[in-house]
Amino acid sequence: MAQIKNRLTPFFENITFDRDDNELVLNFGPQHPSAHGQLRLMLHLQQEQIVKAHPDVGYLHRGMEKMAENMIYNEFMPTTDRMDYIASSSNNYGFALAVEKLVGLEVPRRAQVIRMMLLEINRLMSHLFWLATTALDVGAMTVFLYAFREREYLMDIIEGYCGARLTHSAIRIGGVPLDIQDTFIAQLKDFLDKFPQAIKDYEDLLDKNRIWLMRMEEVGVISTEMALSWGCTGPMLRASGVAWDIRKEEPYELYDEVEFSVPFSDKGDNYARYRVYMQEMRESAKILYQTIDMYKKTQINNQTELMAHAPKYISAPKLDIMTQNYSLMQHFVLVTQGMRPPVGEVYIATESPKGELGYFINSQGGAYPYRLKMRAPSFWHTGILTDLLPGHYIPDVVSIIGTTNIVFGEVDR
Amino acid sequence: MRAYKGKGDVQAKPYYTDRYWVAPRVPKFDVESDEVFSKDLEVIKSKFDVLEAFIQVEQMTVFINPDDNYKVLQLLKDELDYTQLSEMSAIDFIETRDGFEIFYQMLSMNKRKRIRIKMFIKNGAAINSVEKLFRSADWSEREVFDMFGIEANGHPFMKRILMPYDWQGYPLLKTYPLQGDEFAAWYEVDKIYGKEAREEIGPEIRDTATVDRYDSDRFARLGYEVPIGVKITGNEPKNTQNYQEEGGVFLIRKLDKDSSKVIDDPQR
Amino acid sequence: MAQHKINYTQNGGLPVALTSMDKVVNWGRSNSLWAMTYGLACCGIEMMAAGASRYDFDRFGTIFRASPRQSDVMIVAGTLTKKHSEFIKRLYDQMTEPRWVISMGSCANTGGMFNTYATVQGVDRIIPVDLYLPGCAPRPETLQYGVMLLQKKIRANKASRAQKPKRLM
């Protein structure tokens, strides 16, 4: 059958025979099952070995920064969900924190505890997803099925809280919209009790697996200098010998009150990153146990406030809106016109599951941000492939992309 | 007559403005109030012109001359221990000041401090690439070029990064509308089918409030759908959703909802 | 020797079934819908979840294939940007007839919340779509329901006669 007519000419010639250096150019993506989205790599090959790699991104560029300039602050919150869509709440949180710092808001304690719970659940979801997809790329289908099973339990908890599985919008500027549901703690405890066994299952499957070791050890070694120079953060940096975790070093929320350690390694290869991710899951579980206790303490102390009190910027609680005229008026103005933060600039970094997630906001005193720049960790974790891939062989490409844990909503924004 | 609207900034504007509104400011503090920052600033000041420096939201902002950017960043990296360039980008001030503000967001892990180096460049000017110092600037500068059209001198591969290579216009300029210009509107049609297909495929529906009223009332009637053209009486029979045809499917057992077991506990 | 009583004239009375060619072909087509892994954005994650342990797509005969040449249905899961638009056309052309397209999620249906310069306002501007799934992102159940509806659609068509290829223009 004849093809449907179009204007597209043959676009990428895979093989150039008439070059005398015997170099082959391989096009990888943008639709490739193990490219974790829409990554396109142009690889120059000498036999099986990569001599030059050229990552091409932007296939998921949706113009979020432009959208931010055309939206009031609260309106932009759902858009941040779609950035790192594996762990939406951490994006919501980064944006909310940046605006709170710009405005100077104090978030009530119970809201802080709930935020921490959501952030850590999101971290677990993201890490489980990372484990599932990377293992699948490397060939371990079993781990994919197992890790998705645990992720679904967490999805249930989150869904019970905010109603969505993937795009949560669970955090508002100034606090959280809702208290956690009655079953939240029980479900979370139930999960956390089962979780150590689950991690052990994954490790039993992978740790001494010959194929896994062959494809992970001594592959994709990132030196400390390279990681710093490329702006790597999060597990990528920690696996390269720098124990830098923003939760620990520049604590936000109540992270200075919880006890956890920062796993790191100085190997810098794929296997080190895998180990860091696995350890981080354990640490997150530890934090979650502590947040449950903190939440119970807020119940005892009767700290029920969920949103900051700042009539100029934040709507009053629902009860006040429904009963008091002034609150209703103020809510109406805030919803239709939006808050107007003071003139100034702010850059706030938070530790998202992938690394340092920063929001830079330049406000000119209007209801719309004048410029909003999102510093997404994956952007540089993709960039590092330019320097990292040369010298490796084709099968290593997949495992290296896997362990960088890139998400294209975040790379291209 | 319609009021004149400037073309310099076509971004969304609030429909209501208060003439007497004076925007508050995020407080700025003297650099002397922080020990580490004041030492750093002295080192920078001893070698380069510093136009302005202050602390805002726990971070120091330093304005420098655009020609010094490479050397200042080198100083920060080599002597002052700011080992990471977390972010760099530009802010469009063409309408008000005919230029851009470029900012470099630096991080020192040993001091646990963040500095923002800022500089103002005229519209049309290029910046010096700092790609040799920080590899992360490689992609950042490409992004700035892609979004604002600011070129970086000495960059090895100054091409668009997020938009396609054949794209026209710089999306993050304030003069560029959110929903794109005409080139953007027809980009995929022109590229795939050619210009002559424009008429057949039709323009993009950009108005999110577009509702086909003859369609929408049937859309909302889930379970009580009415074919188009038929008058809605309000007492239509319920139209149950079927996965399978009435008469059954060849070789497949028919789903019997009464005998099937519904699992209520997702954690089973 | 055991005596078997088989009603040869009834469907399900295996080992022999009497039916029309149409039904056999459609039975095969609708119950082995191999989907192309085309996760573009957020919906792609829900598509993976639909294929993973809890929702288990395999029981519908739907297996994800990495190559367009081996797949029957293209699930466009996520935002299609202008930069990518060219490739969706290429991939669609590489699929063999008969082929179907499910547009999953608001972004693929209409551009959704991304009403910006960089987003294609609906994949149906580029390739013909059979089924639109609403939601941002649609739940895996929605995708499963969509696949079942597509199966119903396939069964409703005549298989024996050569089908006219769907085309946008």
Image (cartoon, rainbow, N blue to C red):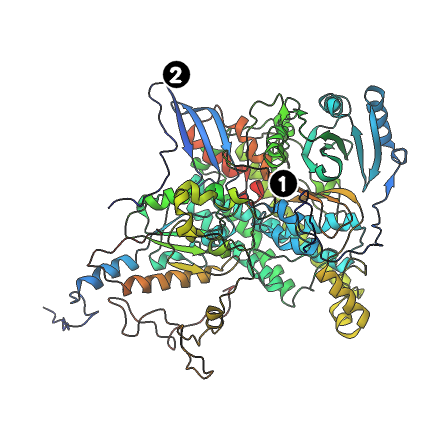
Q: Distance from label 1 to label 2 (Cα)?
A: 41 Å
Mark 2 residue crowding within 10 angstroms, few (<14) / some (14–19) / many (20+): few
**Rendered view: B262 above or below A222:** below
Same-subunit check for callouts 1 and 2: no
Residue type for callout 1: Leu
**SS at badge 1:** loop
Where is residue B157? Give x, y as percent.
55, 25
> On the picture, is A33 further left or further right than A256?
left
Query: What residue would you read off at disc 1?
Result: B172
Q: Quadrant of the N terminus of chain B?
A: bottom right
* Residue of label 2: A21
**Which chain hosts label 2?**
A
Q: Is residue B158 visible?
A: yes
Question: Seen in the image, is A74 located left or right of residue B253?
Answer: right
Amino acid tagged 2 = Asp
Q: Position of residue A286 (x, y in %)?
A: 66, 50
